[in-house]
Image: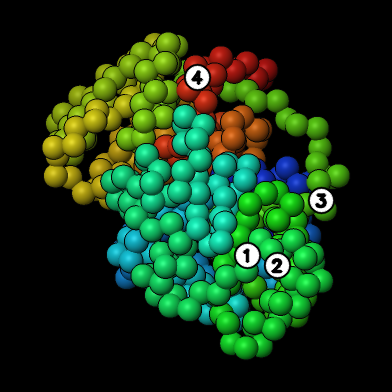
Amino acid sequence: MTRFVFCADDFTGASDTLATLARSGLSARLYLSAAAPSNTDNDPGHGSKRLDAFGVATSLRAVGVEDGVATITPIAKQLASPACNLYHFKVCSTFDSAPDTGNIAAVADRYADAVGAKWKAIIGGQPSLKRFCLLGNLFAGASDGRIHRIDRHPVMAQHPVTPMDEADLRCHLSKQGWAHVGSIDFTMIRKGRSALSAEIKHRIAAGETETLFDVTEETDLLTIGEAIQDIARDMPVLCVGASSVAQALFPSYAHRTPSAPEAHRRPGPVFAFAGSRSPLTAEQVAQAKSYVKHSIRPSDLLNTATSQHLIDDCVAALKSGKNLLVSLSDDRDHDIASHDLARASATFISTISNAVALGFLLIAGGDTSSMAVQKLGIDSLSFAADFDAGAPIICAHSANRELDQLPMLLKGGQMGKPTLFDNIAALPVAKP
């Protein structure tokens, strides 16, 4: 019986939620279409006991309000199940979004309506990724190890699409349509499960529809999760937040976690594409020594002739057995919309990945990852192995034999060690 259903606004975070559920011992699968589960034996909406949890990954983070609402509406209707009261809208742990791009409130409202959730729990932090919410304000770690208020973060405050210029998540979300977000701070959470459950019930009875929870340490998540489970016994609940939602709700499953699977790659070369502009990704690209490297200009991807020439060169390098790392040059003078660039990058990645028997596919960049995986022609993803914080290895499932069982890693700009690319290249090759 399905205990938990999630819809993710991008693929990098979706893979982390998938991994979090798997670590907790739940059987879980990530689909590219909400219709896909009903076409399998694992139909969560029709009483199957084979999946404890499942999710659908989207590119909602990168689209406008109208497109976002149009995308979530049919997905949410298909996700709704009378047998499940715990739903999750997975958003980035930095909550980077804007009224006109990746609007969290507009999508969550439509999601909640479809599944019958009258109350939404906003989980404000993920300590495992150095994301903390204190008195409603969001803080995040940077690559230098320091913790910054999100509106002073060296990367997120300058995000090219959705810069975070407000640390108070209540104010941030009010700009997107939630004018009356309540806040439960750490002092109430520290009173324990019973007191917190009573406080939530009191607020729901008073008409509060969105409540933001502080998260300053892992124990906060445990108490929040227990209280939400109490509420979900009587009504559907939509949780909004990062993979910390799954951490909060299913800690009691930890004893079921099997021994950690070994990270590996298939026979064949590694193809890596870096579309992120973050300083950490730039450092990871610079440190990579195990690849043939191509730096390409964003404008080249939108030029049909130039792009095809680049594809031919890349395919030739991979077919010769060499690992290949393609990165977008930091050309900030172009006037290409971020969504168009991500779509062109996705086409580039998909064309190459379908032309070569790859041993591993690595994509850096949230929007790029989301669109590229949708373009590839795979059906679903499962957890394969832990690898780096916020960046697990996942496995593709597809009718295409070249793509089926392909190990992949999808990472956001802020995730991974500086040596991540070479660490992937150094993975042992699985025995046939």
Residue placed at 27% from the left, 26% from the top?
311
At which x and y percent is residue 128?
A: 63, 42
- Asked if the residues shown at circle 2 and circle 3 are in contact, with their CB atoms under 8 angstroms apart, the answer is no
Q: For the residue labelled by badge 4, is the local secondary structure a helix, a strand or a loop?
A: loop
Q: Is residue 29 left or right of residue 358?
A: right
Q: In this view, does 339 lie to the left or right of 12?
A: left
Q: Which mark is residue 355?
A: none
Q: For the residue labelled by badge 3, is the local secondary structure a helix, a strand or a loop?
A: helix
Q: Which of 33 and 399 is in front in this view?
A: 33
Q: Which of 358 and 40 is in front in this view?
A: 358
Residue placed at 57% from the left, 42% from the top?
130
Residue type for callout 1? Asp
Q: Mark 1 points at which residue?
A: 185
At which x and y percent is residue 316?
A: 32, 16
Residue type for callout 2? Met
Q: Mark 4 points at which residue?
A: 419
Count neighbours of disc 3 (C-alpha within 10 A) and say few if under 14, some if 14 to 19, many if 20 or more.
Answer: some
Q: Which of 360 and 10 is in front in this view?
A: 10
Establish if 414 lies above or below 180.
above
Distance (Cα) linking label 2 and label 3: 25 Å
Residue type for callout 3? Tyr
Query: Which of the two discs, 4 and 3, labels the residue nearer the N terminus?
Result: 3
Residue type for callout 4? Thr
At which x and y percent is residue 338?
A: 26, 47
> Looking at this rendering, what residue extends furthest in the bottom direction?
206
Q: Name the residue under label 2.
A: 188
Distance (Cα) linking label 4 and label 2: 41 Å
> Looking at this rendering, what residue extends furthest in the right direction?
255
Q: Quadrant of residue 59?
A: bottom left
